[in-house]
Image (cartoon, grey):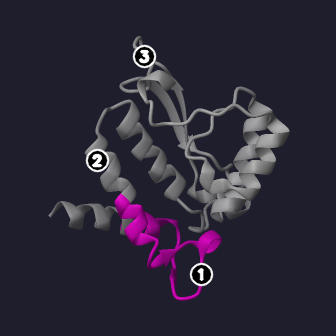
Amino acid sequence: MGKEYPSVTLLHHYPDAFGRLLLIKPGDFDVVTVDHMYLAGVFNDQCGAIVGSLGMIPSADLRMNASGNASGCFGFYEPAHGSVPHRAGKNQVNPLATVLAAALLLRYSLRQEAAAAAVERAVDAVTRQYRTYDIAEPGTTLVGTAEMGDAVVRAITDAAS
């Protein structure tokens, strides 16, 4: 697949070296693929620490299409975080990883790049003002799961108007 995207740099790393690089130079990586579930979980948790919360990380397990790329392929999309059982039913869990996983679905399986980008722009706009407990910062408004989801829907709707 790398041959189809000559502007993308493809690098291979041993897991221990990659774990170190991910911590000291996270901006060097846009996409990470791992073929071992245990290592994927370890690196996933590292990424959560880097971006501030696992609640911000979408995930896509993609089956390449006949052309050898991910466009229009079958995929399994989900937030990368776990179930957060101690916050279940309390309107506290960050829904943005799930929303961003939906953007990946739009982009890769449904080939709706404009819609995917609209969802990502909405999340970016909303998080400038609103935050769930896991990503709260001074100067932002603390909201729950439902309020965050509603804010993203409003941002998408307002942008489409």
Residue 62: x and y, percent? Answer: 52, 27
Give x and y (percent) for residue 140: 51, 83
Segment colored magenta: 121-150
The residue positioned farthest toward the left in the image shown: 161
Magenta highlight on residue 51:
no
Q: Quadrant of residue 109?
A: top left
- Residue wearing tag 2: 115
Residue 147 on image: x %, y %: 44, 71
- CA–CA distance between discs 3 and 2? 21 Å
Q: What amino acid does circle 2 point to?
A: Ala
Alpha carbons under labels 1 and 2: distance apart? 28 Å
Q: Secondary structure at mark 3?
A: loop
Is tag 1's residue or tag 2's residue first in the polypeptide sequence?
Answer: 2
Secondary structure state at the residue bearing disc 2: helix
> Answer yes or no: do the residues labelled 3 and 2 have beta carbons within 8 Å?
no
* Residue at mark 3: 65
Q: Nearer the viewer, residue 114 or 143?
A: 114
As helix, strand or loop, the secondary structure at mark 1 comes to loop
The image shows residue 14, relative to residue 51, as above or below, that is above
Residue 41 appears in the rendering? yes
Dot 1 or dot 3: first in sequence order is 3
Q: Quadrant of residue 25?
A: bottom right
Give left or right: position of 19 versus 48: right
Q: Residue at x 30, y 67 (%)?
A: 154
**Mark pair 1, 3: CA separation:** 42 Å
Tell me, yes or no, if residue 1 can be seen here: no
Residue at image mark 1 = 137
Of label 3 and label 2, which has the lower sequence position?
3
Three-letter amino acid code at disc 3?
Asn
* Residue 24 drawn at (x, y percent): 75, 58
